[in-house]
Image (cartoon, grey):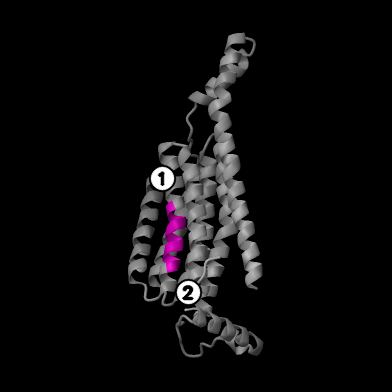
């Protein structure tokens, strides 16, 4: 189990590095490649239409807020605020983790899709889509890791009448939990 | 207008989470609040990029989300096993 999670972590680390690389290359190309190419085209004078199109793209405003992007950003920020209220008000570590993880995924995706609609240029929208893919990969995994660590280290949970630990009621699983907590306590 | 409302919501969420970060009874609450704060900061940077039109903030948001995720994983592995890798 530990080996599987290590493999997962290595794959995610590789994904992080892979997701940094194309952004830096794209920026490098746009800084050093685009400006001399535009200068050469203007020297030749044959591509006047392309120059005009490029100038229009440069002079047009970068951000145009439409109704769709406004509604999506409002949706996302409302859910982020609801997640913060849930973190502050819920009685338990596990319920706070539940509020944080689920609502952060929903609200973050709302804000990011709204931002992708708000930007005019396609390059920025591609970057935002990269951030969306990264959110979908990492937000549930971090929530899972926090919940697993808290449960295996025995954080107390909120007890009402009739609350029971169903995971520990399974006989075969409780042995695993006990041995791993013994290992964790022996390493301290 | 909508961007300002979104900024106000995100900053209010940050304030509420910082209260939980200081007052949390367990380390689990603090790790949860830290994870939420890192994601919230990345979203704040994206909304700020829309407000100012400065594109390089998007790369900064990507880096902030990557660093927040990796540090959350490192914190949980340290608190569970006593070792990070």
Identify which residue, A17 or A117, lies in the foreground.
Answer: A17
Label 1: few (<14), some (14–19) or many (≥20) C-alpha neighbours in 10 Å:
some
Note whether A135 is above or below A184 in the view shown: above
Rendered location of residue A126, percent (x, y): 59, 41
Label 2 SS? helix
Label 2: few (<14), some (14–19) or many (≥20) C-alpha neighbours in 10 Å:
some
Quadrant where the image shows the C terminus of chain B: bottom right
Label 1 SS? helix
Note whether A132 is above or below A138 in the view shown: above
Rendered location of residue A62, percent (x, y): 48, 32
Rendered location of residue B14, percent (x, y): 37, 58
Tell me where residue A122 sits by quadrant: top right
The outermost residue toward the front is A187
Which residue is painted at 61% across and 18% down in the image? A50
Which residue is painted at 62% across and 59% down in the image? A10
Which residue is painted at 47% across and 90% down in the image? A161
Numbered circle sitting on residue B3: 1
Identify which residue, B55 or B7, lies in the foreground.
Answer: B55
Rendered location of residue A108, percent (x, y): 51, 54
Numbered circle sitting on residue A95: 2
Q: Is residue A139 magenta?
A: no
- Foreground mark, 2 or 1, reads 2
Instruction: Specify whether A1 is left or right of A93.
Output: right
Note whether A123 is above or below B24 in the view shown: above
Q: Chain of mark 1?
A: B
Identify which residue, A63 or A143, lies in the foreground.
Answer: A143
Q: Note whether residue A72 is visible.
A: no
């Amino acid at each position: 189990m530990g080996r599987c999670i290590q493999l997962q972590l290595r794959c995610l680390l590789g994904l992080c590095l892979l997701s940094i690389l194309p952004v830096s290359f794209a920026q490098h190309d746009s800084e050093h490649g685009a400006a001399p190419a535009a200068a050469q085209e203007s020297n030749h004078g044959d591509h006047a239409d392309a120059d005009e199109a490029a100038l229009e793209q440069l002079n047009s405003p970068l951000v145009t807020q439409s109704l769709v992007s406004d509604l999506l950003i409002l949706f996302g920020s409302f859910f982020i605020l609801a997640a913060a209220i849930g973190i502050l008000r819920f009685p338990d570590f596990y319920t706070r983790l539940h509020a944080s993880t689920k609502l952060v995924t929903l609200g973050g995706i709302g804000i990011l899709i709204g931002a992708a609609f708000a930007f005019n240029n396609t390059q920025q929208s591609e970057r935002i889509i990269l951030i969306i893919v990264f959110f979908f990969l990492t937000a549930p995994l971090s929530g899972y890791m926090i919940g697993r660590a808290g449960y295996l280290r025995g954080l107390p949970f909120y007890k009402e009448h009739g609350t029971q630990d169903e995971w520990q009621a399974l006989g075969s699983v409780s042995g695993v939990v006990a041995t791993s907590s013994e290992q964790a306590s022996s390493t301290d | 207008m909508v961007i300002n409302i979104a900024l106000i919501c995100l900053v209010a969420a940050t304030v509420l989470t910082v209260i939980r970060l200081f007052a949390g009874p367990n380390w689990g609450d603090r790790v949860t609040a830290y994870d939420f704060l890192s994601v919230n900061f990345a979203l704040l940077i994206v909304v700020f990029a829309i407000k100012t039109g400065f594109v390089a903030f998007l790369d900064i948001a990507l880096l902030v989300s990557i660093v927040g995720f990796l540090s959350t994983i490192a914190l949980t592995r340290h608190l569970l096993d006593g070792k990070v890798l």
